[in-house]
Image: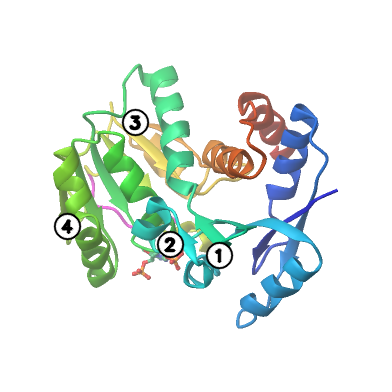
Amino acid sequence: PPLYAVFGNPIAHSRSPRIHALFAEQTGVALSYEARLAPVDGFEAALDAFYAEGGRGANITVPFKFDAWRLCVRRSPAAQLAQAVNTLGWDEGGLWGDNTDGIGLVRDLARVLAADTHRPLQGQRVLLLGAGGAASGVLGPLIAAGARAIALWNRSADKAQALAARHSALAAQHGADLQVVLEPPTHWADGVINATAASLDGRALDLPDGVLRPAQWAYDMMYGAHDTPFVAQAHAAGASAWDGLGMLVEQAAQSYTLWHGEAPATAPVLATLRAELA
Ligand code: ATR
């Protein structure tokens, strides 16, 4: 069967092989999808070897999304804005790259918002925490989805400034107010998205009181068997909060559609993954 893989470092705990196997089973497509560990300074060589073995497409995760972006000869508008690629393929033109993280976030967030709060994403005031690879992938799609205002906060403000500058034309085009903030604003956002890696060390972000509050929503791009520190923090403040497992499934579904030309149903796959995490 045609060969696909996800590249990262670390990669052992990736759920992507499982998700793509479930999509393949559901749609009756024969494929093989592996998790591949690449050395931190050896992504290009690992990708070349994969192609030589018959690799047709790959997902890319931390820390190789920027390397992947650099290596592509053609990039989608989403990949170009993000300067990060999570989906690769080869065709007559060579190596192409896309970024499906943003569409994945927007689809899952729109779903949980509608189901749990009966609100659309359109018109919301959003505080986006972080300015690394994860935040870069989702800012453009959030603007395009109609968020009315986005405040971008990052521990290192210069990275937030660069990310906002790259998106200023898109924000103007959609009439969205995009601003970099030096402190997370209190009593301002309708919803807060955590795109920082802070909880990787198991700790919550140190947010001022009033950033997270009741009647608000919160979304963590991280996920786990138990509430993430950010989800727990948001619940404690009285907000509705969800983790990023649904985003993971949705970004995978969009990659799958790009490769195989068929959109899999995500709800049953998300339910299976959630059950397997527990
Ligand atoms: P990713 O691709 O997961 O976004 P990254 O590019 O390394 O990974 O970015 C990690 C993000 O988490 C950055 O926004 C980082 O802030 P800096 O740009 O200041 O490094 C943020 N981050 C990581 N640990 C953090 C912590 N303990 N508190 C706040 N932000 C943190």
Nearer-the-camera pick, 11 or 265: 265
| Residue to which mark 4 is pinned | 181
Q: Name the amino acid type tagged 1.
A: Val
Q: Can residue 142 be seen?
A: yes
In the image, the residue with mark 2 has its CB under 8 Å from the nearest atom of ligand 1: yes
User: Would you say 107 lies left or right of 182 here?
Assistant: right
Specify the label residue 238 is tagged with: 3
Q: Residue at x 52, y 67 (%)?
A: 72
Q: Name the amino acid type tagged 4.
A: Val
Q: Name the amino acid type tagged 3.
A: Gly
Tags 1 and 2 touching, CB below 8 Å: yes
| Residue to which mark 2 is pinned | 133
Give the extent of the magenta segment. Answer: 204-209
Q: Secondary structure at mark 2?
A: helix
Of tags 3 and 4, the one toward the viewer is: 4
Q: Position of residue 81 (x, y in %)?
A: 34, 57
Q: Residue furthest bottom?
A: 41
Is disc 2 surrounded by few (<14), some (14 to 19) or many (20+) residues within 10 Å? many
Q: Residue at x 29, y 66 (%)?
A: 155
